[in-house]
Image (tube, rainbow, N blue to C red):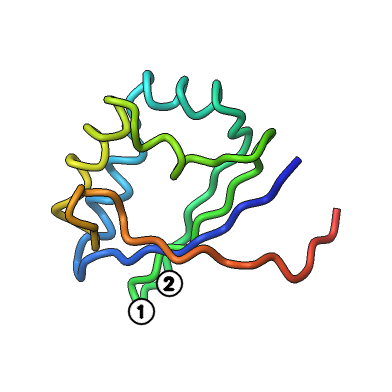
Amino acid sequence: MKHLAFKMYLNEGQKAEYKKRHDEIWPELKMLLKGAGVSEYSIFLDEETNILFAFQKVDGNSGSQDLGQTEIVQKWWAYMADIMETNPDNSPVIFPLEEVFYLE
């Protein structure tokens, strides 16, 4: 099982909306993630910096950010673009993080 972590940036004042949208995650997006081998996916918010910290367990070599060519992920990115920092294609600006310790 591979572990992936990355950070993203939430726009100021968007915590409640970000949480609401993820509480109502689209079933087809959830199925796509699970089908791609993402077995666990958590996102944490540092409210002092508006940094989102994402962690995934992945069975395989790719995680959620590698699904950008799919229509449903592109629609999700467009849906989220108004509340977070994004690239020109609406994908979230992410910064991959290196795992330096893991305790099972």
Q: Quadrant of the N terminus?
A: top right
Image spot of residue 15 (x, y percent): 28, 59
Residue position marked by numbered label 1 in the rendering: 49
Based on the displayed image, in which of its 4 quarters is residue 2 positioned?
top right
Based on the displayed image, in which of its 4 quarters is residue 28 positioned?
top left
Based on the displayed image, in which of its 4 quarters is residue 10 positioned?
bottom left
Residue at 37% from the left image edge and 80% from the top image edge = 48
- Nearer to me, 74 or 54: 74
Image spot of residue 77 (x, y percent): 25, 42
Q: Secondary structure at mark 2?
A: strand
**Which residue of the protein is positioned furthest toward the left in this rendering?**
82
From the viewer's perspective, tell me whether residue 97 is left or right of residue 81: right
- Please say if 31 is above or below 45: above
How much space separates mark 2 and mark 1, taking CA atoms?
6 Å
Label 2 amino acid?
Answer: Asp
Image spot of residue 42 (x, y percent): 53, 48
Residue at 55% from the left image edge and 43% from the top image edge = 41
- Nearer to me, 19 or 89: 89
- For disc 2, the neighbor class at 10 Å (few under 14, some 14 to 19, many from 20) is few
Query: Mark 2 near mark 1, Cβ–Cβ under 8 Å?
Result: yes
Residue position marked by numbered label 2 in the rendering: 46
**Which residue of the protein is positioned furthest toward the right in this rendering?**
104
From the viewer's perspective, tell me whether residue 31 is left or right of residue 38: left
Residue at 57% from the left image edge and 58% from the top image edge = 5
